[in-house]
Image: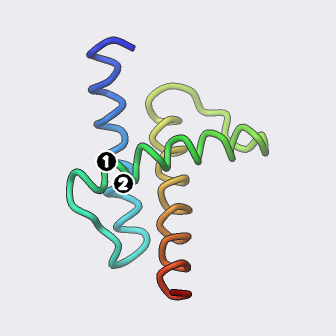
């Protein structure tokens, strides 16, 4: 992975984490936290969407949508775990 790809990956992760924080109210983690949530969400979203053959949008838009969906799922799981603890 080149430097340009890494920067784009981190930007997509940050935007996806920020969007997920807006969708799941009250769960923003700041720039670095949103980036981490977005990157983990990107892996989760791409796995789930590929597994269920749901999203067939390519390019940056598809990656952003998949990462946001995965980040929202991740934040909802975090909310459930915090309530259970």
- The residue that appears at 37% across and 77% down in the rendered structure is 25
Residue 80 at what x, y percent from top left? Answer: 55, 80
**Colour treatment of the image:** rainbow
Question: Which quadrant of the figure contains the N terminus?
Answer: top left
- The residue that appears at 48% across and 78% down in the rendered structure is 79
Secondary structure, mark 1, is helix
Residue 77 drawn above or below residue 17: below
Q: For this rendering, which residue is in front, 37 or 55?
A: 37
Secondary structure, mark 2, is helix
Label 2: few (<14), some (14–19) or many (≥20) C-alpha neighbours in 10 Å: many
- The residue that appears at 29% across and 67% down in the rendered structure is 28
Q: For this rendering, which residue is in front, 46 or 65?
A: 46
Residue 8 at what x, y percent from top left? Answer: 31, 27
Residue 8 drawn above or below residue 39: above
Q: Which mark is residue 35?
A: 1
**Residue with the most extreme left position:** 31
**Residue with the most extreme front position:** 85
Nearer-N-terminus badge (2/1): 2
Residue 62 at what x, y percent from top left? Answer: 53, 36
User: Are the residues flagged by discs 2 and 1 in contact, CB closer than 8 Å?
Assistant: yes
Residue 24 at what x, y percent from top left? Answer: 43, 72
Residue 81 drawn above or below residue 16: below
Instruction: Specify the quadrant of the image occupied by residue 3.
Output: top left
Left or right of 53 on screen, residue 61: left
Instruction: Specify the quadrant of the image occupied by residue 17.
Output: bottom left
Q: Which mark is residue 54?
A: none
- Label 2 to label 1, Cα distance in Å? 6 Å
Residue at the disc numbered 2: 17
Instruction: Specify the quadrant of the image occupied by residue 34.
Output: bottom left
Left or right of 79 on screen, residue 1: left
- The residue that appears at 54% across and 54% down in the rendered structure is 69
Label 1: few (<14), some (14–19) or many (≥20) C-alpha neighbours in 10 Å: many
């Amino acid at each position: 992975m080149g430097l340009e790809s890494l920067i784009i990956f981190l930007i997509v992760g940050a935007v996806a984490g920020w969007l997920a924080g807006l969708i799941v109210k009250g769960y923003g983690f700041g720039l670095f936290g949103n980036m981490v949530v977005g990157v983990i969400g990107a892996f989760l979203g791409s796995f789930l969407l590929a597994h269920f053959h749901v999203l067939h949008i390519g390019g940056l838009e598809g990656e952003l949508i998949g990462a946001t969906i995965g980040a929202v799922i991740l934040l909802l799981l975090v909310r459930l775990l915090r309530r259970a603890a």
